[in-house]
Image (cartoon, helix red, strand yellow):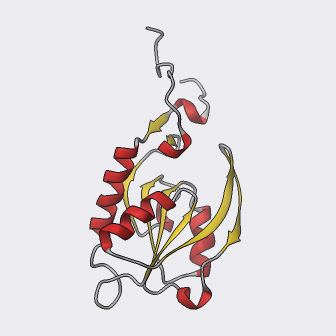
């Protein structure tokens, strides 16, 4: 086995796929909020959680949507998570009734930072890698730790070399 760069074992997600998977996540979360099963608000972890959060908010008819901005990547290199913007503190409280959405949990460091602020929130991601799974309550698709996910908002259409072989 040869060493590969992160992008060489890629999982390409189309807009259609992220939409289908986000809807599947919404269906899994439907009726799972505290009390009567509804969610008080959705908080997207920016930027990756914004598209799934929008789809989930529509599916679950949640009208209060906010963001928490965490920077933990410089291009394809992960660094320490830093909070750049937080949602309204009064709305958030300890997180009870809040659904926190991200596109992917990788190492779990980003969700760990957010969970420390809102310990009673429900954390949901569309995709999950094994190291991050302990930080997420609900996800749709698991991928291997060494897979790099290419989301549609990061991509342009272009030719890609085959994974193996030259023909």
Judge by depth and name the residue closer to the eye, 56 or 81: 56
Judge by depth and name the residue closer to the eye, 67 or 141: 67
Residue that appears at 30% across and 67% down = 59
Image coords of residue 152 (percent x, y): 48, 43
Image coords of residue 124 (percent x, y): 43, 67
Split into 4 quadrants, where in the image is the C terminus?
top left
Residue that appears at 35% across and 46% down = 17
Residue that appears at 41% across and 78% down = 63
Query: Considering only vertical position in the picture, is 148 above or below 62?
Result: above
On screen, residue 69 versus residue 140, left or right, reads: right
The image quarter containing residue 75 is top right
Residue that appears at 53% across and 33% down = 156
Image coords of residue 65 (percent x, y): 48, 75
On screen, residue 71 versus residue 150, left or right, reads: right
The answer to whether residue 151 of the structure is visible from this angle is no
Image coords of residue 91 (percent x, y): 54, 88
On screen, residue 122 versus residue 36, left or right, reads: right
Query: Considering only vertical position in the picture, is 153 above or below 82?
Result: above
The answer to whether residue 103 of the structure is visible from this angle is yes
Question: Looking at this rendering, what residue extends furthest in the top direction?
Answer: 167
Query: Considering only vertical position in the picture, is 49 above or below 64?
Result: above
Judge by depth and name the residue closer to the eye, 47 or 104: 47
């Amino acid at each position: 086995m040869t060493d590969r760069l992160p992008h060489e074992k890629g999982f390409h997600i189309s807009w259609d796929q992220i939409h289908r998977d986000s809807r599947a996540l919404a269906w899994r979360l439907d009726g799972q909020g505290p009390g009567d099963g509804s969610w008080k608000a959705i908080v997207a972890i920016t930027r990756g959680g914004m598209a799934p959060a929008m789809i989930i908010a529509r599916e679950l008819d949640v009208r209060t949507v906010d963001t928490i901005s965490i920077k933990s990547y410089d291009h394809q290199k992960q660094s320490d998570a830093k909070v750049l913007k937080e949602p309204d503190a009064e709305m958030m409280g300890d997180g009870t009734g809040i659904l926190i959405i991200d596109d992917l949990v990788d190492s779990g460091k980003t969700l760990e930072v957010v969970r420390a602020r809102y310990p009673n929130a429900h954390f949901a991601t569309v995709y999950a890698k094994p190291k991050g799974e302990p930080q997420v309550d609900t996800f749709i698709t698991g991928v291997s730790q060494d897979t790099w996910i290419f989301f549609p908002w990061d991509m342009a259409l272009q030719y890609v070399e085959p994974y193996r072989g030259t023909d």
